[in-house]
Image (spheres, helix red, strand yellow):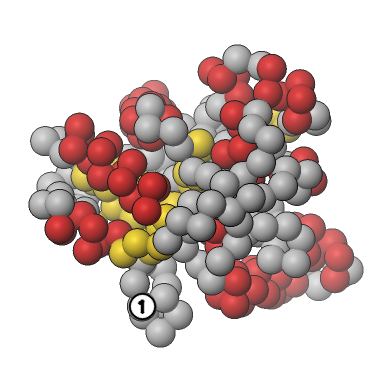
Amino acid sequence: MEIAKNLNDFAKTPIERRRSVYVPLSLRRKIPTKDCGEELVGIEKFFISNRQKIFLSPVWDKKDIPEMLLRRSAVKKLLKISGKINKKYFFKITDAYRPISLQKKLFQQVCGEVRLENNRLSEEEIKTRARRFVADPDFGVPPHSTGGAVDLTLADELGNELDMGTKIDALDDRVETFSDKITPTQMANRKFLLDVMENEGFVNLASEWWHYSYGDQYWAAFHGKQSAIYGSL
């Protein structure tokens, strides 16, 4: 996977090519956040009130996150997409807004897993590896803590997920959106999800086919914007 080296050069490249390029945290951190003050909205309640079906499969216990939340504009965009595809597909969401406290808990959990795999690594090496899989809340603005990032896939009317090559949150190279280690059918499913999400302004994280952002630093970097509109909540 290609990694962006410079934000200015990245912003000048065609969007089709930007899709498969990963913008590292070191570059994203350079983008300021100017939070617009938009509120968080309950995803399930919003969909139900608009008579739209959605599947929620939270990775967190309700004591950690009682309700799946996203910024209002992000939820409205998901609803609009759902209205276009729901004769055949429906969203299944596994993760959305995470408070900073939960982000810290998750990062420490992943650090522990890395430490168990190789106890010869220094603490900084452990953190560096862990940052590949989860945002370090002490090293920039975590996307999920802005309320603009969501982990999702597509499912049929019974909730059966489309074959995307891996499950959400799998830890192998096939999770890269444009991995060359998946089948043509799996790639077609990923591209369909990518197209419908991009058409409503979401941006995919190139290292995770399921992760989409709106309004955060990754979104701002992808579109060459001067600042992100969502900061940590």
- Seen in the picture, residue 108 relative to 140 is either above or below; the reply is below
The foreground one among 28 and 106 is 28
- Seen in the picture, residue 85 relative to 214 is either above or below; the reply is above
Query: How many circles with numbers are drawn on the protein?
Result: 1
Left of 187 or right of it: where is 51? left
* Image spot of residue 128 (x, y percent): 79, 58
Left of 121 or right of it: where is 183? left
Q: Residue at x 56, y 75 (%)?
A: 102
Left of 147 or right of it: where is 53? left
* Image spot of residue 79 (x, y percent): 25, 44
**Where is mark 1, residue-wise?**
66
Which quarter of the figure has residue 77? top left
Tell me the quarter of the image containing the N terminus. top right
Q: Amino acid at mark 1?
A: Pro
Q: Residue furthest front?
A: 37
Q: Residue at x 62, y 44 (%)?
A: 228
Q: Residues within 10 Å of mark 1 (few under 14, many from 20)?
A: few
